[in-house]
Image: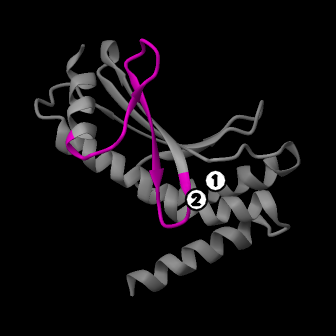
Amino acid sequence: MGKIFEAISNFFQADGWPIHQIGTELAYSMTFQGENGKWTCIAQAVEEKEVFIFYSILPVNTPENKHLQMTELITRANYGLLIGNFEMSFADGDTRLKTSMNTEGVSALETPIQKLVYMNVLTMDKYLPAMMKVIYTDVLAAQAIAQVEECLELVML
């Protein structure tokens, strides 16, 4: 077990997350329940490159006829994100939020991992309603993102 995977294990266990190792990979799968929905997350250690990656995966794949609208939505969302990015596979519509960090030279990893994980899930939770609107309704990406970001501005006032 490498130092990143050990730190991931320590953080999630101490924080009370139910984690499941993915086969023999240095990765865990878990679910997160936000205010706007529930989804699967993946925490991965890439020890040889000294990188920690955390994904929040949209609970449904984006249908092919909505790919362009979802692409516009995630591009608009990505433009203002400080940490991480949304991405979508055009092959199957798998849409996710990825945050990652280089751990080289970092001795105590649990706190940076905690901050990265919570930044990820809180960001996914904020944008999840817009993504679901694009998938399940005829709302355009620009309208869906504007509604989410307008709500965020109201919360910050």
Q: CA distance from mark 1 to mark 2?
A: 5 Å
Q: Nearer the viewer, residue 22 or 70?
A: 22
- Magenta-colored stretch includes residue 79: no
Residue found 43% across the figure and 53% down from its top? 121
Residue found 76% across the figure and 61% down from its top? 134
The x, y position of residue 33, in whole percent, is: 47, 56
Q: Is residue 75 left or right of residue 52?
A: right
> Does 19 appear above or below 112?
above
Q: How is the image coloured?
A: one colour
Q: Looking at numbered disc 2 in the image, what kind of residue is underneath it?
A: Ala
Q: Is residue 70 left or right of residue 48?
A: right
Q: Is residue 38 left or right of residue 76?
A: left
The residue wearing badge 2 is 77
Tell me the quarter of the image containing the N terminus. top left
Residue found 85% across the figure and 42% down from its top? 64
The residue wearing badge 1 is 74
Q: Residues within 10 Å of mark 2 (few under 14, many from 20)?
A: many
Q: Residues within 10 Å of mark 1 (few under 14, many from 20)?
A: many
Q: Secondary structure at mark 2?
A: helix
Highlighted magenta segment, given as a residue range = 14-38
The x, y position of residue 83, in whole percent, is: 40, 50
Q: Is residue 26 left or right of residue 65?
A: left
Tell me the quarter of the image containing the C terminus. bottom left
Residue found 66% across the figure and 65% down from its top? 130
Q: Nearer the viewer, residue 41 or 150?
A: 41
- Magenta-colored stretch includes residue 18: yes
Tell me whether circle 1 and circle 2 mark residues in contact (CB < 8 Å).
yes
Q: Secondary structure at mark 1?
A: helix
